[in-house]
Image (cartoon, rainbow, N blue to C red):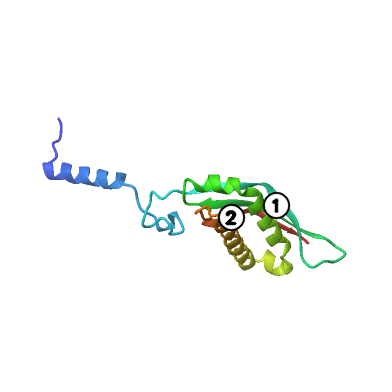
Amino acid sequence: MKRRYPTAWASLILAIAITLSLPVASEEAGDGNNADNPAQFTDYIEMQPAFVTHVGEPSERVRYLKADVSLRVNTETARAAIETHMPRLRHELVMLFGEQTDLDTLSSPDGQQLLRETARDRLNQVLEEQHTGETVTDVLFTSFVVQR
C-alpha cells in the first residue's frame, strides 16, 4: 500500500531540497577584493627562476635570501605587459631584496608583509613608467628562506 503525502509536505520537501542545493556564500572565500564583483578576473604570474641574493650588512659571513615570487593581477592584459617588462621587474626585486639589512625584521611576518607591499609598489612604479596601464594587485612569496 502506497502512502500519499499531502501536497503541502511535498512542496516543503521540494523547497528544502532546492535551498540545500544553492551555493553558500562564504566570508572566508577570499580577501574581500571580489565582494562586489564575484566574476572579477584574477591571474597569478610566477617569476621564474627563484630569487637568490645576498642580504644583511656586509661582513665576513655572507647571508642569502631565496624567494619564490608570484604576482597577482586582475586584468587579462596584465600578463603580456608583465612578461614584456620581466627583466626590469626582476631587477627591481633583486635590488629591493639586496637592500634588506635587518635580518630579524626580514624573518618576521610583519617584516615580510612590509617587504611584499614595498615590492608591489616598486613593480607598479615600473609598470607606470612604462605606460602599460597595468598594476600588480599583490606580491606573493610562495617560499621565503633567509640563510643566516
Label 2 neighbourhood size at 10 Å, few (<14), some (14-19), many (20+)? Answer: many
Against 98, residue 18 (above or below) is above
Residue 94 picture location, percent across and down: 70, 56
Sequence-wise, which precedes: disc 2 or disc 1?
A: 1
User: Image check: 7 left or right of 143?
Assistant: left
Quadrant in the picture for residue 28: bottom left
Give 124 or 32, whichever is nearer the viewer.
124
What is the secondary structure assignment of the residue under circle 1? strand
Give yes or no for contact between labels 2 and 1 (Cβ–Cβ under 8 Å): no
Q: Give the percent coordinates (x, y) of residue 68.
A: 65, 51
The crowding category of the residue bearing disc 1, from other C-alpha atoms within 10 Å (few below 14, some 14 to 19, many at least 20), is some
Q: Quadrant of residue 105?
A: bottom right
Q: In the image, what residue occupies the spot 83% across and 60% down? A: 62
The amino acid type found where label 2 is placed reads: Leu
- Residue depicted at x 59% and y 51%: 70
Residue 80 appears left or right of 35: right
* Tag of residue 3: none
Q: Residue furthest right?
A: 60
Amino acid marked by disc 1: Phe
Image quadrant holding the C terminus, namely: bottom right
Q: Is residue 82 above or below residue 116?
A: above
Question: Where does the image place residue 93, in percent across and percent down from the top left?
Answer: 66, 57
Relative to the observer, which residue lies in front, 29 or 84? 84
Point 40% across, 58% down: residue: 27
Describe the element under mark 2 as helix, strand or loop.
Answer: strand
- The residue labelled by disc 2 is 140
User: Could you say which is closer to the camera, residue 139 or residue 108?
Assistant: 139
Can you give x and y, in whole percent of width and height, for residue 3 in the image? 15, 35
Residue 51's disc is 1
